Image (cartoon, helix red, strand yellow):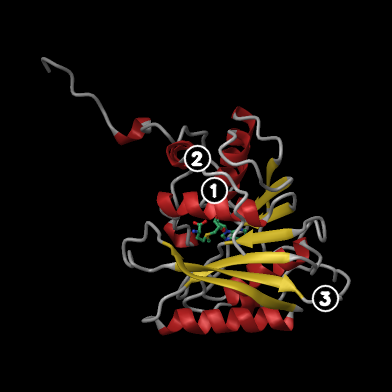
């Protein structure tokens, strides 16, 4: 049922806030399937996530898009008056972890933290969260196995008790997206969850070779009488890491380390040179 008590959002203020976050994002590594969501969709997605996770502890399993930052920032700026009580981003890219920390520090977003973590490893904070969000590698070449790895870490984060939003490809003309959607739903059910909501074809991305490819929100909820948290373990089956980021692009990297501190909103010195007047 629609919530009619919600006040209207100042759209200009919301877009400008998301624009601040976009300026702070490191450039995406295509080989690691970092493909950023378009800005208009980020505005809608952030508001939706903030409402969904109001007063909850929310874990992000990977977050190159920086939806975590948008959610925290919209609330801190008073553009929305609801949102999670705590947000932690778990990502294997130190540039992303540092970008989140830097923004949180600058804007005093006390509820927002980030930590370096590869979902290959056992999850460090089992059961410390109420809900999880993940926009994982979409598993086009491994039937969604990479989605399952990220979703599993999310389920561990909430101790298999609560809700999770999984953002994956959704296209009526691409067979692989339908296979992955079915496999992800099956995995959720086998893990003690059911699909509580499916919001089809919600988001678009900066993806040159498939600019029209959209993603959906697949929301899982744990079944009543959820099982007690299981211990989290590192992945030992190498098959789960194959074609993780695309054909023959297996998961081999533990961390993406930052080489130098960059101000992502400004041109880098090595991008240009001045040809002076009179030269
Ligand atoms: C793979 S991308 C998926 C596309 C998404 N739109 C994005 O760009 O964030 C999602 C996030 O997962 C992170 N990631 C990729 N592989 C990971 C891994 N093995 N462990 C933890 N995080 C990972 C990436 O750094 C990125 O921030």
Q: Which residue corresponds to the image point at 81% horizontal and 65% vertical from the top-left? A: 159
> Where 4 sits versus 22, above or below?
below
**Residue 236 located left or right of residue 13:** right
Q: Is residue 11 visible?
A: yes
Residue 182 lies in what quarter of the image? bottom right
Residue 241 visible within the image: no
In 3D space, how far apart are the residues under numbered discs 1 and 3 (Cα atoms)?
Answer: 31 Å
Residue 112 location in percent, x, y? 68, 41
Hey, which residue is sitting farthest left in the picture?
Answer: 278
CB atoms of marks 2 and 3 within 8 Å: no
* Residue lying at the far front of the rendered structure: 4
In the picture shown, does residue 140 fall above or below 129? below
Helix, strand, or loop for circle 1? loop
Q: Residues within 10 Å of mark 3 (few under 14, many from 20)?
A: few
Whether residues under marks 2 and 1 lie with C-beta atoms below 8 angstroms apart, the answer is yes
- The mark total stands at 3
Rendered residue at 75%/52% (across/down):
57
Please indicate whether residue 145 sits to the left or right of residue 178 in the image.
Answer: right
Image coordinates of residue 174 in percent, x first then y, are 39, 81
Say if mark 1 contacts mark 3, CB within 8 Å: no
Residue position for label 2 = 21
User: Which residue is at the front of the view, 197 or 249?
Assistant: 197
Q: Residues within 10 Å of mark 1 (few under 14, many from 20)?
A: many
Residue beneath disc 3 = 224
Residue position for label 1: 66
Q: Earlier in the sequence, mark 2 or mark 1?
A: 2
Q: In what quadrant does ligand 1 lie? A: bottom right
**Disc 1 CB within 8 Å of nearest ligand 1 atom:** no
Q: Marks 2 and 1, how far apart in space? A: 7 Å
Q: Return the x and y of residue 204 as percentages of the image width and height.
A: 40, 61
């Amino acid at each position: 049922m629609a919530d009619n008590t919600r006040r209207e959002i100042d759209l200009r203020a919301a877009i400008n806030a998301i624009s601040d976050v976009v300026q702070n994002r490191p450039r995406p590594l295509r080989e690691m399937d970092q493909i950023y969501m378009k800005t208009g969709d980020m505005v809608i997605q952030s508001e939706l996530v903030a409402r969904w996770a109001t007063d909850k502890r929310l874990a992000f399993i990977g977050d190159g898009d920086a939806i975590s930052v948008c959610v925290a920032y919209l609330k801190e700026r008073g553009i929305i008056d609801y949102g999670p009580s705590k947000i932690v981003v778990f990502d294997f890219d130190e540039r992303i972890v540092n970008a989140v920390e830097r923004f949180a520090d600058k804007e005093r977003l006390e509820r927002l933290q980030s930590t370096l973590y590869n979902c290959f490893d056992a999850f460090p904070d089992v059961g410390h969260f109420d809900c999880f969000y993940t926009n994982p590698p979409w598993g086009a070449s491994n039937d969604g196995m990479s989605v399952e790895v990220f979703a599993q870490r999310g389920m561990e984060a909430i101790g298999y008790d609560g809700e999770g939003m999984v953002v994956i490809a959704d296209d009526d003309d691409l067979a692989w997206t339908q296979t992955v959607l079915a496999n992800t739903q099956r995995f959720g059910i086998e893990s003690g969850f059911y699909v509580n909501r499916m919001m089809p074809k919600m988001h678009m991305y900066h993806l040159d070779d498939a600019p029209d490819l959209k993603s959906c929100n697949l929301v899982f909820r744990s079944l009543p009488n959820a099982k007690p948290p299981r211990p989290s373990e590192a992945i030992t089956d190498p098959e789960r890491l194959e074609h993780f980021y695309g054909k023959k692009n297996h998961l081999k990297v533990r961390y993406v380390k930052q080489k130098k501190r960059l101000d992502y909103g400004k041109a880098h010195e090595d991008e240009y040179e001045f040809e002076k007047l009179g030269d």
